[in-house]
Amino acid sequence: MKPLSGHAVAVLGSMADRPLARYLASLGARLDGEVESASFVIDDLGLEKTAHLPIPGSAVHVSVTPFGSGGPRAHWKGGELVASAMGGALRLTGEPGEKPVKEAGDACTFHAEMVAAAGAMAAHYARGTHGRGQHVDISIQQVAMSRNVNGLLVWQFDRRKLDRAGGCIAYGKAKVRVIWKLADGWCFHALMTGRLGAPANKALSDWMDESGIANPMRGVDWLAYNRSTLPAETRAEWETAMAGFFAARTKHDIATEGHRRGVNACVVNEPSDVLEDRHLTARGFFDTPTGLPERFAGLREATAQVAAPVVHAGDRPGPLSGVKVLDFAWALVGSITTKTLGDMGADVVKIESRGRPDLSRLDVQVSASSAASLDDKPWFAHLNSSKKSLTLDLKAPGARELLDPLIEWADVVAENFSPGTMAKLGLDYDSLQQLNPGLVMVSGSVYGQTGPMAREWGVDGTGGALSGRTYLTGYPDHDPVIPGAVPYGDVIVPFVMAGHVSAALQHRRESGRGCHIDASMYEICVQQMRDFVASAKRGERPRRMGNADPSVLFQDVFRAAGEDRWVAISAFTGDEMNRLLAVTGPDIGAWTSTREDHAIVEELQALGIAAGALQDCEDLMENDPQIAGRNALVMLDHAVLGPFGHVATPVEFSRDRMRPYRPPSMGEHAHEIARTIAGLSTGRIAELERQGVFK
């Protein structure tokens, strides 16, 4: 299935080998289009520098630049390091108190281009509605900022700032260690909160007991464990014991015995390991002419053909206006997918359960939240703007009275449970097709829906560890660190999912066929690491490089005046390097160390040298005119917390502007949905309420 077959892409600037071009090609588009007749135009130049070109009014024109088109800093020079610095990601990567280090590869650029892919496909769908193209504008800085939801929330609510976390992940109030030294390498392991994490946590504790080491976690009630509220001294004691345990294990132990026991751990792979991975091999991920990955997500087209849906727009603004989404998603991957679709104008009904609430309704990250409420979590609010909430006990006898009409109503079903879960509920794609043959279903998981590891459980860091991202992030003479200290796979996969959904919906208009989309975090993270995998395929062994980049003449991070203030500087040509040294002298670090970071940046940018301050959340939210001008935070009301800034879906459409609305309270719209979509009477709704269906 190639939903962009027949569409030509005009590639401008240096976009030919970039992820967005590969993404469009993976869906069947040709990358040899002329601007005058192109269906898509993609560039890294910006709207101002392409305004003179004869781009057709019907074309979807996508620009991906360091700071976006328009605004006071649109002309600034950037690159991966500078955009990461100005977007807040670089400041959070590295060991506490030490010099920050960039994530492996062009992580922020890859993220931005997956956002661009989602925007391009939404504009493509909108073109199918109203027949007109538009400009889709992406700022790498804004996209990098959008990933740091935790940091933005704790600054807004508690005036706290997250810091570099080394081998830990920062969850607001908690900092949880996840990278562990082994006897012959490293592994990724996280103690997860509540019902989902309990079996894996107990499996590790039992293994520690059997190994004979002192185990302070013996007898813990893992169902009651909450990573956000565990006392710091208790966590320190646990992690000391875990470090000793892992130090005596090998990579083989983790991959075999750890896997057999169900421990939530995986080996930190090198790129050469990725090429030999049996799961990727079984899924045919490298079965391409070059032996390098081409697929961003799998597509299985429906066999049944339905009448082409009527072209229509709904009541909400945005490129996906009129699209109806049934949302079974939870946590980050699925929730960001449906948030993106909802912010872009789709009508989203979120299925929830008080018996198994979303993890983001449980984590207490700010002082305004408590463990006693499911409706006071700003993290959940951010992830679930532009949605309505229906609480439903899917196992209750009357649940299908509501669910079946919703399945028939939906254009899209989204889920990110472990593969096999939806089938157990009778909600897998083949079953749903019986009720709605034209349905587009999208499934996101760590390993994908097929293959020997498909039903294994994992989290964001699993994709990073397996793909080589973690191994290659850090300084050459140090252990690897968490690449970004904030989620990566969890926020990249949703934009691939959302992009594929829009492409599939337009394909359904043209062909009458729905499809099932299979998105694997592991595979998408490998796509980000593609250059390193290619290097390994040539027989090389990529190593951690700190802030260096083989494609950049010179770049690094330098200390500025003030506590934990830094600047990132890149020189791409010999002329830029000469201009830089003419200002700083031979010791760049000595020159920067006595100067204020933003003053350094202004001076160097005025000379045409790429430079950026390593901004924190206060800088971004309160002092950055480019971020403010792009409305990167949208003020939405909240039933419990009041109005606060929610992170906007980081894409600008020139024609179909987005207008997100506030997130829902638990089950807020249950009776409304039962009445207006399921068509149930007031009396029947009351009876189902008494039966406990709306739980």
Image (cartoon, rainbow, N blue to C red):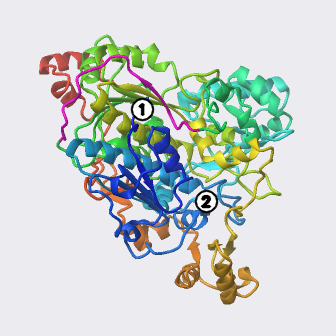
Can the viewer see residue 681? yes
> Looking at the rendering, in which quadrant would you find the N terminus?
top left
Q: CA distance from mark 2 to mark 1?
A: 28 Å
Residue 129 on image: x %, y % = 22, 42
Q: Nearer the viewer, residue 101 or 653?
A: 653
Look at mark 2 in the image and give the residue it sits on: 92
- Return the x and y of residue 255 as percentages of the image width and height: 75, 28
Q: Are marks 2 and 1 in contact (CB under 8 Å)?
A: no
Mark 2 or 1, nearer chain start = 2
What main secondary structure does the magenta stretch of the protein show?
loop
Residue 544's disc number: none
Say if the magenta span includes residue 490: no
Dot label at residue 329 = 1
Dot 1 falls on a residue whose secondary structure is loop
- Which quadrant of the view contains residue 48? bottom left
- In reply to whether residue 310 is colored magenta, the answer given is yes
527 to the left or right of 312: right
Q: Which amino acid type is marked by label 1?
A: Ala
Q: Which residues are magenta?
A: 294-314
